[in-house]
Image (cartoon, rainbow, N blue to C red):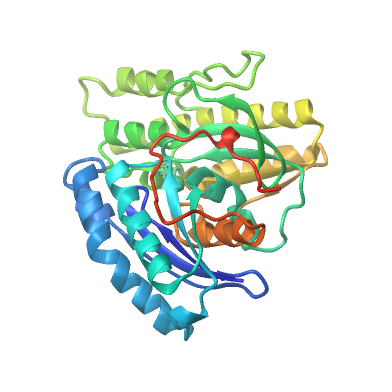
Amino acid sequence: MLVLGVETSCDETGVALYDSARGLLGHVLHSQMAMHQAYGGVVPELAARDHIRRVVPLVESLLVETGTVLADLDGIAYTQGPGLAGALLVGASVATALGFALGKPTLGVHHLEAHLLSPLLGEPKPAFPFVALLVSGGHTQLYAVAEVGDYTLLGDTLDDAAGEAFDKTATLLGLGYPGGPALAKLAETGRSGAVTLPRPMKDSGDLNMSFSGLKTAVLTLVRGQDALAAQKADIARGFEDAIVDVLVAKTLAALDRTTFSRVVVGGGVGANRALRERLSAAASRRGAEVFYPDLQFCTDNGAMIALVGALRLRRGAVDDYAFTVRPRWELADLSMPP
Ligand code: KG4
Ligand code: ZN
């Protein structure tokens, strides 16, 4: 089954072709990062308008690149939520109109399910069941994943998501937007232990997390003073050490609770090198294995949407063409068609 995936939930327009038998055939992406940089964050109206400009030309170039014609498609999947309503509507309307015109089935996909299953795009593929650590710009959650469509929420962030904390802290250090990758790069030049920051809720006894206090601690350090470059690097390192520490501790606790032996990481912060190194080391000490998406599939992309579309359309899931978007949508509410 050959599926076109369309992702427009936030500030990346991504389209991809995934085939159930042959795997990922191709994917293309346009990032709006440069456009939003001037505003220090994503401007929803600008994001939606830019998706309108990009999505059809991106689909056209994907088809040329992969030697595919629209008639080859067996279905079209699009991100239905969660995300920015106006941005989601672009992908939903384009995908649905295309499906209607071609007489092909269309399906709205949950963006977080796509992040969570994105390691299935690579090799080796994780087997079920597993613990999923979802660390994106908007979400930091732990799930017990029994199979595709069966997600039990184990822990959540009570305030800022990990990616959001990276971005806000990067802004405090004058690193621009989105600052996660820049902060991680700066942290590599900082000294571990030179700045010690709190580990919020690390020993709370549950699997919930909180990161806004960490950002406030950094604010207190930098307020009113122009931190020197070296101090900034130490602060960045202290911040990264603290957040990674909490994420690793909570993920190990989730392994204990579920008695699973596999962890899957999804979402933009999954690209963080310190997190990858420390989580893999800690898990392997317990005989558990960690699976990450390819770096290019950690942040938003069309490939993960096409993948989930193929998994679900094959099982008979399908929308009628009266589409809707779901800016707020709980992953634990999903199920699989019987
Ligand atoms: O999953 P994603 O593309 O967007 C959402 O669906 O929310 O994640 C984007 C987030 C941003 O907050 C970005 O700063 C963060 O992932 N991020 C990183 C790294 N690469 C991206 N954070 C830390 N280290 C990185 N290397
Ligand atoms: Zn995302």
Question: Which residue occupies the extreme left position in the image?
Answer: 38
Residue 329, image x, y percentages: 47, 35
Task: Give the vertical position of 18 relative to 200 (above or below).
Answer: below
Q: Is residue 217 left or right of residue 320?
A: left
Residue sitting at the far top? 204
Observer-nearest of 187 and 244: 244
**Which residue is pictured at 27% across the width and 55% down the height?**
32
Give how far across and how far down residue 6 sits, in percent: 42, 61
* Residue under the point 60% across and 25% down: 155
Of the pair 45 and 37, the residue shown nearer to us: 45
- In the picture, measured across the screen, residue 146 lies left or right of residue 185, that is right
Q: Quadrant of the N terminus?
A: bottom right
Quadrant in which residue 35 is drawn: bottom left
Tell which of 313 and 331 is nearer to you. 313
Q: Is residue 244 visible?
A: no
Q: Quadrant of ligand 1?
A: top left
Looking at the picture, does residue 56 appear above or below residue 38?
below
Q: Closer to the camera, 107 or 286?
A: 107
In terms of image quadrants, where is residue 235? Answer: top left
49 sits left or right of 249 in the view: left
* Residue in the picture at 61% in, 38% down: 133
Rendering coords of residue 305 (x, y %):
50, 57
User: Residue, x 25% and y 20% (percent of image)?
Assistant: 223
Image-based side of 307 in relation to 58, left or right: right
Image quadrant of residue 61?
bottom left
Percent of width and height locating residue 185? 42, 47
Residue 164 appears anywhere in the view: yes
Q: How many marks?
A: 0
